[in-house]
Image (cartoon, rainbow, N blue to C red):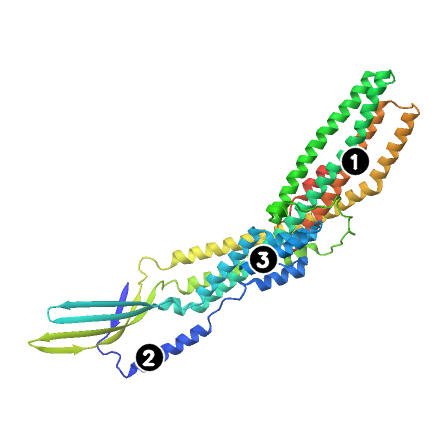
């Protein structure tokens, strides 16, 4: 480290006012360019984009009044059976994980404000007394390198803050999408359990009737055993469906962020009717243009590029401190006291002998290229996810429509004709039970297909605007009807 100190009157007393004026002017100009905290922690753009994209409102709960207002609105929404839209709104108001994301945005804003402020000066005071001499040294030192590069550092921090804001928007979309997915799963599970419960009631009556017919000799032991086994197997299916309904409801409760008496919310008995299919001509282009996580990655790459440029510009100077020094010296010899007050300035500059700044430049360059490759990978994945999400959305719609328009009506006809033939003694109990089992399986598969369509619609939306697409493709394949 090299230190340069100029003292002993190198700056005259007359020049001090000019120096103070120059320093004050520089400080005023610097402070004028400093950023200031936003009144809501940077939430206004987040709330605006969330409202325009998904039609829901979101707020940062940062005071008891805000918490009370959010709780009042949640209770008003819970007073009615919740819908997919109200579930998303409740999650945005109650989910504490989302509030933590908003806190992360506030932390990033604080870092941005801190980076836009001039470096704090350090003040030193030294007093040395020896015999009849006394020396008092006063120093004011500041990091000149940080002050010189303040605009660049502030620009980098601002870009990082913008990226954090996009991540907060993405977290909001993800929370709303998770709530919608959980809602559709919970309603579908409950509808399946209700359907199986109704089917078990009918099968139970048939099994009891077969048993009584067996007691009179009108039904064989084989028919009685088949009817009883069918009833027992259906009871097992109902038990599993009830467990799934309970698990899916708890998953919805977690997504909504509810506890206490609020968990006694009401769900609709059935999934809603399917809306008309959406057409999308430029899914890939819309996703690349609107995906907030991709926008955040672009901003982070921009900040990394600025950091690389700053590292190159300051590679030979990693530390530069400057300051003012003022001494007061008093020496007494033979009763005569001599006083002097030399004033000067000092500069500390680290000499780049062993480290020419290449390590910082290489690190910044590799970090920049890493961000470039991650961004390119993400852009490729976004396009693929958009294509897959739309294909799944379109396919799940066709599957659900097939069940609704063809399979279920055909199953009703088959059940009616089978019952007529059984009453006419044209078929036996085994064929009647087999037909009934197939009809129940079709009902359950139709509910699952409609659920998959709604899940795919949520995934399709998130694949375009952001919010972590799900895995509807696997679910659709699991519930797809047979090709025949």
Label total for image:
3
Q: Which quadrant would residue 212 be assigned to in this image?
A: top right
Circle 2/circle 3 CB separation < 8 Å: no
| Position in image of residue 81 (x %, y %) | 71, 49
Q: Image point 78% across, 19% down: which residue?
A: 225
Q: Image point 18% across, 71% down: which residue?
A: 135
Q: Specify the farthest residue to the right.
A: 424
Q: Which quadrant would residue 342 be assigned to in this image?
A: bottom left
442 vs 60, nearest the viewer: 60
Which element is circle 2 on? helix
**Viewer-side label of 1, 3:** 3
Q: Which residue is mark 1?
A: 442
Q: Specify the farthest residue to the front.
A: 261
Disc 3 crowd, CA 10 A, few/some/many (<14, 14-19, 20+): few
Answer above or below: position of 29 versus 311: below
Q: Which residue is mark 3?
A: 68
Nearer-N-terminus badge (1/3): 3
The numbered disc on residue 19 is: 2
| Position in image of residue 305 (x %, y %) | 49, 61
Nearer-N-terminus badge (2/3): 2
Disc 2 crowd, CA 10 A, few/some/many (<14, 14-19, 20+): few
Q: Image point 36% across, 79% down: which residue?
A: 22
406 vs 352, nearest the viewer: 406
Q: Is residue 212 left or right of residue 333?
A: right
Quadrant containing the C terminus is: top right
Q: Is residue 82 left or right of residue 22?
A: right
Q: Is residue 431 left or right of residue 321?
A: right
Q: Specify the farthest residue to the bottom.
A: 14
| Position in image of residue 385 (x %, y %) | 65, 49
Q: CA distance from mark 1 to mark 3?
A: 47 Å
């Amino acid at each position: 480290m090299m230190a340069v100190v100029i003292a002993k009157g190198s700056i005259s007393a007359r020049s001090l006012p000019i120096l103070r004026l120059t320093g004050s002017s520089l400080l005023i100009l610097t402070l004028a360019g400093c950023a200031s905290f936003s009144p809501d922690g940077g939430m206004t753009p987040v709330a605006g984009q969330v409202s325009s994209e998904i039609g829901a409102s979101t707020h940062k709960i940062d005071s008891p009044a805000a918490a009370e207002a959010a709780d009042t609105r949640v209770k008003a929404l819970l007073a009615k059976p919740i819908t997919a839209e109200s579930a998303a709104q409740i999650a945005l108001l109650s989910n504490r994980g989302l509030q933590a994301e908003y806190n992360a945005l506030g932390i990033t804003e604080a870092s941005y404000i801190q980076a836009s402020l001039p470096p704090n000066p350090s003040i030193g005071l030294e007093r040395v007394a020896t015999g009849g001499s006394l020396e008092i040294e006063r120093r004011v030192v500041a990091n000149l390198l940080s002050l010189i590069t303040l605009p660049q550092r502030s620009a980098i921090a601002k870009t990082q803050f913008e990226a954090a804001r996009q991540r907060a928007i993405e977290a909001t979309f993800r929370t709303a999408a998770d709530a919608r997915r959980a809602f559709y799963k919970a309603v579908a599970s409950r509808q399946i359990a209700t359907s199986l419960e109704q089917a078990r009631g009918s099968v139970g009556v048939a099994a009891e009737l077969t048993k009584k017919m067996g007691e009179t000799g009108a039904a064989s032991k084989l028919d009685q055993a088949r009817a009883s086994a069918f009833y027992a197997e259906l009871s097992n299916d109902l038990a599993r469906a009830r467990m799934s309904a309970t698990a899916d409801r708890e998953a919805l409760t977690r997504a909504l962020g509810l506890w206490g008496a609020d968990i006694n919310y009401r769900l609709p008995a059935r999934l809603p009717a399917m809306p008309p299919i959406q057409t999308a001509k430029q899914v890939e282009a819309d996703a690349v243009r609107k995906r907030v996580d991709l926008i955040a990655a672009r901003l982070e790459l921009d900040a990394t590029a600025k950091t690389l440029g700053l590292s190159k510009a300051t590679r030979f100077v990693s530390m530069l401190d400057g300051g003012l020094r003022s001494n007061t010296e008093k020496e007494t010899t033979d009763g005569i006291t001599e006083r002097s007050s030399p004033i000067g300035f000092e500069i500390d500059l680290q000499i780049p002998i062993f480290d020419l700044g290449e390590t910082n430049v290489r690190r910044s360059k590799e970090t920049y290229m890493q961000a470039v490759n991650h961004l390119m990978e993400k852009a490729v994945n976004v396009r693929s996810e958009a294509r897959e999400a739309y294909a799944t959305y379109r396919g799940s719609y066709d599957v659900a429509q097939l069940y609704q328009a063809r399979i279920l009506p055909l199953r009703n006809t088959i059940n009616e004709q089978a019952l007529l033939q059984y009453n006419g003694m044209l078929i036996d109990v085994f064929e009647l039970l087999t037909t009934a089992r197939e009809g129940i399986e079709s009902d359950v598969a139709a509910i699952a297909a409609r659920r998959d369509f709604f899940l795919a619609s949520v995934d399709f939306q998130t694949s375009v605007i952001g919010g972590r697409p799900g895995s509807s493709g696997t679910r659709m394949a699991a519930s797809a009807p047979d090709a025949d």
